[in-house]
Image (cartoon, helix red, strand yellow):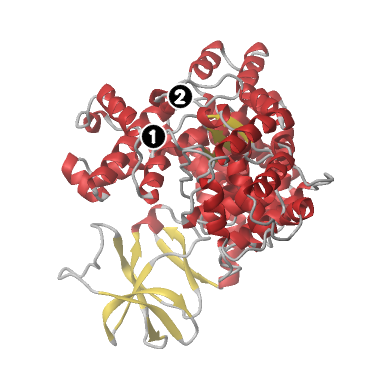
Amino acid sequence: MKSFPANMNWRIHFVHRHDLEDASSRRPAQVLLRSDKFEHLILPLQSEPHRISGRAVHELEQGLPLGEPGEWVACELPVPWVPGRIPVIESPAPLRIHFIEPGELDRRRQDEATESILAALEQDTGASLLSRVAKAEHADRLLGGHLLSVGALLALWTQTSKQEAPELGSEERLRRRLLDAAPSGTTSLQQIWGAPGFERLKLAGEARKSITDAITQAFSRHASLRPGEWRRVREATLWSWWLRSRAVEEGLTGRELSQQLKIDAKALAEIMQGGFAPAPEVRARLPEEDRVLDSFTKSARHPPQEQAAVARIVEAHRPRLSLMSAQLAELERLLGTTERLSKWKSARGTLTDIALRFSPERLQGLPAWERGRLAAQSFRDFLGDKSIDGSLPLDSLFQKTAASPIGMVFPFERLLSEVGMAPGSAPVIGLSPRLIRGSLGAMRFAVAHQLGHLLEHLGGQPRSACTSLAPDDDQVSTEERERFPNAFAMYLLAPRDAVQQLVGTSALGSDHNTYFDAAREVALVFGLSMGAAMPHMINCAVEVESKKQLIARLHQDPRWRAHREAVQNQIETAWAEDRTAIQKRIGDLPEDNVREALRRPRSASFDDYVSQAELQELLTSEVARDLQMA
């Protein structure tokens, strides 16, 4: 951007066609200026009394500025420019350009935005969905974009019955765009009510109530409960999974894969993201589904060696978590049982504060395990832990965090758990059948571990799939990205002070049985597997020169496996209520095979909500059957 002296006798020679076709005295007009003292046209971007800031626009031979054909319209008579003012179109034919103060423009813009909002919300005029959406989008443009119309658009869309609106793009893409944008739009609405210039909208109590209720109700409408949602997600997940796996196996970039398959790079990227199923012409270039599923069955037992490659493939399954989260929330709103969602709304602010306080940006240089320990301590304060020995039942975790456990098959057999959340809903924690049927201590650790990942997400950390691939509870991923959630989980379930109080803080001698007994106490009191309790106990309470070597020697002791299995059975008895809590929330487990990795995760709460909604005629039998069979 360059600066030009304002005293060069500038005149408007061209006006943008959009400003003539949609003239508004409340919006700055785009114009091109010419001066006898300057060889090019300029596009003014900022005008002050003594200078104009903008950029030069080179001309074609016929005297028209560069741009799309017909983009700029020449003025019959050049209009003198007024420095320090803003041009607006008072009338397109005949052309009348008026220059106003910047403050006056803001007032006019706010007035027009208010009018558009009120008009968009008016339900008794018989206006079409398209025209009402257009008014909301017009208000959005006047306010600078993404201030309010994302919420209004979602409200308008979900208030109406299914209507054709091809100008808005496909129904699916529009709905996804609105759902993704709605939370920020809804938040911004609260700022609009009290903003200067919107007093009339603030005083219009009915309008304010209408838009607030509409946006609230928008999330309660069962858009994501429509028949076919899980079929769509299944199709999208299958091919996202296959394309990601193909890219990892052959070491290809997305562009290289698109060239190999002769598929448009942009279309391929969308499919790999898991948002859309392949179009028929793309599907014709992909292999048969049965062949793909057979290859997945073989690779399920042999994940890639690199954790980053595992994460790339597992990301394909995130839409399953998101849709499950969205549908649970919509069913709860449909039935009026929104206690869990209210609890999450209340908890989210506190958890976000914890996440930000212990983020790597805030605590630069502090090891991830130490940040995890400190975050777990604050999380315990949030939970209001009042137990004498520091033990933490799963039921308390689910109650306080509003997280819902679900039974879910993952693409690799050794992948144990994952967390997900859709806009406007509460978190869900996917647990594999293998994990649920196995060690109770390992399952407790997995739930706490996923809450650590949830904190990372709330703190703005890049989202990536969890890559804790554990063949047994002696092995916990040491990859950098898993260190924070691992430490968070360990110290959340077994705080360091409580462990020290239980076993003391001195060397336990050379007798391995002494260590086995101390680890057994930690495992039973805090509900940990022996594989997790032993190193945690040593890290918290034992003073020795090399803790790693000590842990390795204990694991090599022939008596270790017998101790571990005995304690696992004792934990089942001591923490039986946790097993009951999981079974009550998840219900029947899915079959642990690769085809189940494309189906809806299992949740007893979900099944109960669907049955209640059908009984109360809030869902049709078709929708209920589709959800039950998914």
Residue 511 horizontal side relative to residue 268, left or right: right
**Residue 97 placed where, x, y %?**
44, 67
- Outermost residue on the front side: it is 511
Q: What residue type is labelled 1?
A: Ser
User: Where, by quadrant of the figure, is residue 234 drawn?
Assistant: top left
**Residue 278 placed where, x, y %?**
30, 33
Other residues around mark 2 within 10 Å, as few (<14) / some (14–19) / many (≥20):
some
At x 47% / y 29%, what residue is drawn?
409
At x 56% / y 73%, what residue is drawn?
101
Q: Is residue 509 above or below residue 445?
A: below
Counting labels gives 2
Q: Is residue 370 visible?
A: yes
Q: What residue type is labelled 2?
A: Asp
From the image, tell me which residue sits under label 1. 170
From the image, tell me which residue sits under label 2. 592
Q: In this view, does 613 lie above or below 508?
A: above
Q: Which mark is residue 267?
A: none
Residue nearer the viewer, 548 or 112: 548
Residue nearer the viewer, 493 or 193: 493
Q: In this view, does 440 lie above or below 628?
A: below
**Residue 322 placed where, x, y %?**
52, 37
Q: Which of marks 1 and 2 is in front?
A: 2
Q: Can residue 457 be seen in this view?
A: no
Judging from the image, what secondary structure is the residue with disc 2 in? loop
Judging from the image, what secondary structure is the residue with disc 1 in? loop
Residue 513 horizontal side relative to residue 74, left or right: right
